Image (cartoon, coloured by chain):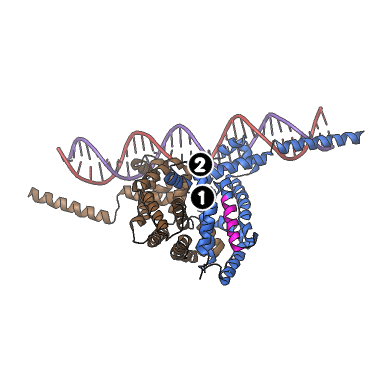
Chain colours: A brown, B blue, C purple, D red
DNA sequence: TTTATCTTTGACCGTTTGGTTAAACCATTT
DNA sequence: AAATGGTTTAACCAAACGGTCAAAGATAAA
């Protein structure tokens, strides 16, 4: 009888847990999401612990209970964002068969990622400015570990030898690719107002068309001239 | 005799003024330069009025005597920076004879400008994030007034008709040109650590080589294929 | 029911922040 | 030499900030 009751209690507890994991996120995650929202929008200096607490619907003291300081909370958010973004972007090296389709894959995944998370570039850039050394090292280890750059570098040199693309320093090519993908997002307010009379939808449409435009721009820039 | 003395006094006063304008800048300018230095490096939220005062070697109250609030001081700096940067960049439209040399002119002046003022992009981007509407309007009026975009747009379409370049939407081309020039500067800490093992000099050299690399990258990307 | 542990809160603290004020300073004018 | 008006300062202020604390609530075990 007691055993039976015990099982029942455990079952009820399990049901309750499943309910919770659907509706009531654990506090730690609520805080995390709220903090990400505020930090990404306002940067470290502009964000207020009070605002994060309100966004999470909790007391300010509870923030410090889970993440002791503002700096630690920010660091956790920053690492989470990087951990989410970087693998997605590096995947292109292992992706398709031909070199040009790899480039297409890269541009498309990058731009689509930023269409869903348009504030991430500004978030990373402003933190880069606030604290260049720490972050650069952190990023570096994440990327170097994957060895994506070395792989891509080899790919490029192979294509140059094959004669499919003109000679270009791998660093230049990848910096160009990244610049073309990212920059229109943090610079959105300028381009949107100058080119599209501040029409939000038109700029959104413009960003979508860039997926194909930038791809062919890059390929045209590097492909070898026909003899 | 009195007249003679008067002249002498005025002459001495003039000498004194010339001396001053060489060595002792007027306080207002000292403040301005100090504020620019601090704001550009730390952004609006990160900058402290106390720090600006110390940088200028004056009392904090004197800041408020000349520029009543932090917001007003920042705005003055921001307008000055924009007023310095934008005309230099727009000059390319009126510059050389051929279309391709215009592009070369644009890239070279832009990159050289940023080599001298590498923190300006981050400064503008972070302010863009903090206050998109105001600034975008301000930028817009500065550029629209000059009508540079319309002129460049016409130039592009002419070249397309002539068949010297492949069809491309002017907005895409100019966004690409700007992205390629600017982005490596605010993203410096990443690229420098990932590609150059944090070697400052090597990255500086890399940025210099971009002047030619980016120019030919763009031209290759848009020039029409030979039949 | 009691006990022990984890979670949550309101009230509070010391510091820093942007901004003010009244008085001192200083060069001209009268 | 006295008055004037712009400049500079030390001292000060209220508000906002990140962070702490003791106590109340909740939860599950003994």
Provide residue B98's location: percent of width, then percent of height: 62, 63
- Quadrant for the N terminus of chain B in the image: top right
The relative height of residue B59 versus residue B76 in the rendered view (above or below) is above
Find residue B68 and report its image quarter.
top right
Q: Specify the label residue B126 is tagged with.
A: 1
Q: Which residue is mark 2?
A: B201
Is residue B17 found inside the magenta-colored segment of the image? Answer: no
| SS for callout 1 | helix
User: From mark 1 to mark 2, how far is it between C-alphas?
Assistant: 26 Å
Provide residue A120's location: percent of width, then percent of height: 43, 53
Which residue is outermost to the front?
A227
**What residue appears at the point 54 percent right and 67 percent down from the top-left corner?**
B165
Q: Residues within 10 Å of mark 1 (few under 14, many from 20)?
A: many
Is residue B107 found inside the magenta-colored segment of the image? Answer: yes
Residue A189 at least partly seen:
no
Q: Nearer the viewer, residue A103 or B31?
A: A103
């Amino acid at each position: 009888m007691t055993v039976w009751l015990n099982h029942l209690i455990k079952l009820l507890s399990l049901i309750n847990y499943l309910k919770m994991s659907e509706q009531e996120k654990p506090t730690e995650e609520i805080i995390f999401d709220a903090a990400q929202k505020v930090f990404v929008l306002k940067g470290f200096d502009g964000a207020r612990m009070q605002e994060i607490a309100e966004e999470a619907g909790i007391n300010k003291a509870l923030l410090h209970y889970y993440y002791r300081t503002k700096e630690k909370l920010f660091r956790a958010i920053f690492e989470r964002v990087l951990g989410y973004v970087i693998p997605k972007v590096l995947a292109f090296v292992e992706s398709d068969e031909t070199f040009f389709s790899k480039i297409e894959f890269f541009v498309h995944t990058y731009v689509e990622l930023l269409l869903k998370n348009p504030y991430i570039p500004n978030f990373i850039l402003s933190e880069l400015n606030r604290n260049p050394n720490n972050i650069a090292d952190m990023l570096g280890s994440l990327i170097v570990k994957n060895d994506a750059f070395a792989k891509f570098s080899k790919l490029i040199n192979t294509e140059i030898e094959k004669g499919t693309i003109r000679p270009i320093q791998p660093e230049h090519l990848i910096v160009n690719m990244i610049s073309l993908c990212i920059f229109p997002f943090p610079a959105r307010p300028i381009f949107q107002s100058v080119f599209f009379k501040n029409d939000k939808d038109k700029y959104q449409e413009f960003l979508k068309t860039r997926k194909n435009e930038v791809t062919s721009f890059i390929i045209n820039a590097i492909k070898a001239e026909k003899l």
